Amino acid sequence: MAVAVVGDATTAVVEMAVHGEWSPQFGDRFSAGLRLCLASPCVSIIIDLHHLKDRSGLSMPFWMAAWRQARLAPSPVRLVFCLSTASALGRRLCGSDGPQPPMFASAPEARIAVAVRSLQADRLQARLPPRPDRVRDVRELAGHACHRWRLPHLLDDTALVASELASNAIEHAGTDFVVTMSRDAGRLHVAVQDGAPAFPRPHRASSAGLPAPAQARGRGLLVVQAICVAWGAMPTRGGKVVWATLT
């Protein structure tokens, strides 16, 4: 089995498309991926089950548990399913006792449904060109977010983290990038989305003998790791998003 994960910082939506035969072992792997998504600054998760092979609907308890996990998370996330109600799994999910998860016939329908919640979220965004002088604008956006949401104690750390993520996008992606600041339950999220698919990696190797610029290159993510309670990256359509969470 395989899961294709695509995020979008501009809408704070993550899509997970499941392919292959259902098995409890796959459920364990999917749960690990779901936990990472729940830790990210998303407000909605779309799980597309159209290509899941489960003729008897035996995986229904697993998906119900995943839906409840998202609802009861410290920062609740709206989890919706894309699935035909005529399938065995669809009938079992619709016929479950108590509250039932939202289900849609297609991913486009699900995207429209979750868009309203995304627009209502506390979020500030800016699209910037890949120029070093625009890091100053990123720091100003971080300051505006902390003042607007009354989080002055996070101002310095947020500005530093946002600057590091933006600098990585400018140096390594070389494309326009979107900076997003969002908050929930006392946490502040910083996300930078660019047009390059390569994921960033913290640089821990010895830099002895290298010139100063090379020594500094790749060290920014170590700063992000030290400051933030969580950080990560996921693919987007045409690039990637790197995010970090501060408390």
Image (cartoon, rainbow, N blue to C red):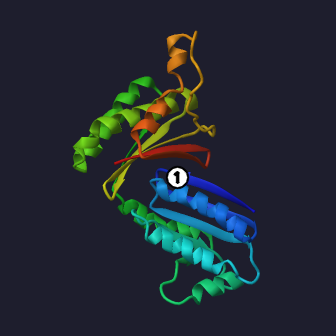
Question: Residue at (42%, 66%) from the top-left corner?
Answer: 76
Inspect the image, locate mark 1, and give the three-letter code of the amino acid beneath it.
Asp
User: In the rendered image, which quarter contains the N terminus?
Assistant: bottom right
Q: Is residue 52 left or right of residue 76?
A: right
Residue under label 1 = 8
Q: Is residue 159 left or right of residue 218?
A: left
Whether residue 166 is visible here, answered yes or no, is no
Residue 124, relative to residue 158: is it above or below? below
Q: Is residue 2 left or right of residue 151?
A: right
In front here: 207 or 234?
A: 207
Question: Residue at (39%, 29%) from the top-left corner?
Answer: 135
In front here: 50 or 227?
A: 227
Give the quadrant of residue 93.
Answer: bottom right
Question: Residue at (45%, 71%) from the top-left corner?
Answer: 71
Residue 171, relative to residue 153: is it above or below? above
Residue 100, given in percent of the width and then of the height, sits at: 51, 83
Name the secondary structure under disc 1.
strand
Q: Is residue 199 left or right of residue 116?
A: right
Whether residue 82 is visible here, answered yes or no, is yes
Residue 201, given in percent of the width and then of the height, sits at: 58, 34
Give the quadrant of residue 205.
Answer: top right
Residue 115, given in percent of the width and then of the height, sits at: 46, 64
